[in-house]
Amino acid sequence: MTHVVTENCHMCRFTDCVTVCPSDAFHGDDEMLYIDPEECMDCAACVDECPVKAIFAEEDVPEDQKKWIAINAEKAPSLPVVNEKQDPLPGAEERKKQLGY
């Protein structure tokens, strides 16, 4: 199995999660992060690090977020690896509040 980044990451892109990933499984674009299922070791270290609760084990992805399994698998391999902490996107703290975190 693998872990999946879901919709809560969109337009936040907090990178706390990437600093604990032992396998460089995180990739990113200008809007969010994605996990490459071929690189993910399924260690779950990233789950608790996400300040907007956007990361789930594949089998635990909420029903309304299942589309993100395919999106992560499709997008991650073609995007650059993100393995160092970066500033979140402008407006990320506001979005975090809107999400209730």
Image: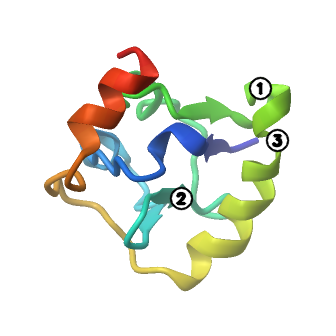
- On the image, numbered disc 2 is attached to which residue? 34
Give the answer, above or below, for where 11 lies relative to 8: below
Secondary structure beneath dot 3 equals loop
Q: Residue 48's x, y, as percent?
A: 40, 21
Q: Earlier in the sequence, mark 1 or mark 2?
A: 2
Q: Distance from label 1 to label 2 (Cα)?
A: 16 Å
Regarding residue 11, the answer to whether it shows in the image is yes
Residue shown at 34% from the left, 41% from the top:
17
Q: Residue 35's x, y, as percent?
A: 56, 56
Q: Earlier in the sequence, mark 3 or mark 2?
A: 2
The number of numbered discs placed on residues in the rendered structure image is 3
Q: Disc 1, disc 2: CB below 8 Å?
A: no
Quarter of the image with the N terminus is top right
Q: Residues within 10 Å of mark 2 (few under 14, many from 20)?
A: many
Q: Disc 3, disc 2: CB below 8 Å?
A: no
Q: Residue 64's x, y, as percent?
A: 81, 32
Q: Distance from label 3 to label 2 (Cα)?
A: 14 Å
The image quadrant that residue 5 belongs to is top right
Q: Residue 15's x, y, as percent?
A: 28, 48
- On the image, numbered disc 3 is attached to which residue? 66
The image quadrant that residue 37 belongs to is bottom right
Task: Give the residue type that dot 2 points to.
Answer: Tyr
Task: Give the residue type that dot 3 points to.
Answer: Lys
Task: Give the residue type that dot 1 points to.
Answer: Pro
The answer to whether residue 20 is left or right of residue 29 is left
Q: Disc 1, disc 3: CB below 8 Å?
A: yes
Residue shown at 81% from the left, 50% from the top:
67
The answer to whether residue 3 is left or right of residue 99 is right
- On the image, numbered disc 1 is attached to which residue? 62
Residue shown at 60% from the left, 39% from the top:
42
Name the residue nearer the viewer: 21 or 30.
30
